[in-house]
Image: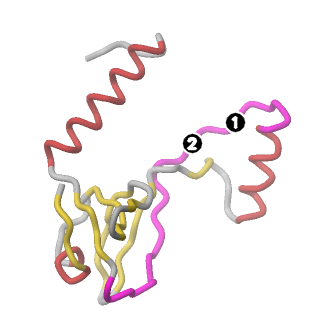
């Protein structure tokens, strides 16, 4: 992992795995999509639910899950514009070996839980 400034981050390719960083604090893990001028698109790894189009839908879905209903499928393809444009924002960028380690750990979690097979 390395910590980079905003200008360096904006020059990185789509697919870069990162977390916004403030000294001693990491925001949630995300994937960078395209850079567009001073902005970039981002895909958070806390997914949306398939079919949710608004914050009201999100709230309704979570209320239903809390009431014991089966959750709709998760949508890992939602991309949103991050247009905060904070020139001082730092980013913790995950190197390929870090991403491979995360994938391995998630596969192990599946195997440990009995929900999947280790590849």
User: In the displayed structure, does residue 50 sit left or right of residue 100?
Assistant: right
Q: Are marks 2 and 1 in contact (CB under 8 Å)?
A: yes
- Tell me which corner region of the image, top left, top right, bottom left or bottom right, holds residue 54: bottom right
Count neighbours of disc 2 (C-alpha within 10 A) and say few if under 14, some if 14 to 19, many if 20 or more.
some
Give the residue at mark 1: 71
Q: Main secondary structure of the magenta part?
A: loop
Disc ID at residue 16: none
In the depicted structure, whether residue 84 falls above or below residue 57: below
User: In the displayed structure, does residue 75 sit left or right of residue 13?
Assistant: right
Q: Give the range drawn in magenta.
A: 66-88
Residue 72: say if magenta.
yes
Q: Quadrant of the C terminus?
A: top left
Residue 30: say if magenta.
no
Disc ID at residue 74: 2
- Along the line of sight, the residue nearer the viewer: 10 or 2: 2
Count neighbours of disc 1 (C-alpha within 10 A) and say few if under 14, some if 14 to 19, many if 20 or more.
few
* Total marks placed: 2
Q: Residue placed at 22% from the left, 74% from the top? A: 9
- Along the line of sight, the residue nearer the viewer: 91 or 9: 91
Image location (x, y in percent) of residue 52: 68, 55
Question: In what element is the residue under mark 2?
Answer: strand
Marks 2 and 1, how far apart in space?
8 Å
In the depicted structure, whether residue 30 falls above or below residue 119: below
Image location (x, y in percent) of residue 15: 25, 58
Q: Residue placed at 71% from the left, 56% from the top? A: 58
């Amino acid at each position: 992992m390395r910590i980079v400034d905003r200008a360096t981050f904006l020059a990185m390719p789509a697919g870069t795995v990162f977390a916004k960083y403030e000294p001693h604090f990491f925001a949630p893990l995300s994937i960078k999509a395209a850079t567009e001028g001073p902005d970039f698109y981002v895909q958070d790894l806390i997914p949306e639910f398939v079919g949710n189009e608004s914050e009201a839908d999100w709230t309704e879905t979570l209320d239903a899950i809390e009431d014991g209903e089966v959750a709709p499928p998760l949508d890992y393809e939602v991309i949103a514009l991050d247009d905060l444009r904070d020139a001082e924002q730092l980013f913790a960028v995950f190197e390929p070996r870090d991403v491979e380690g995360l994938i391995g750990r998630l596969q192990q979690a599946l195997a440990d839980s009995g929900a999947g097979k280790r590849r």
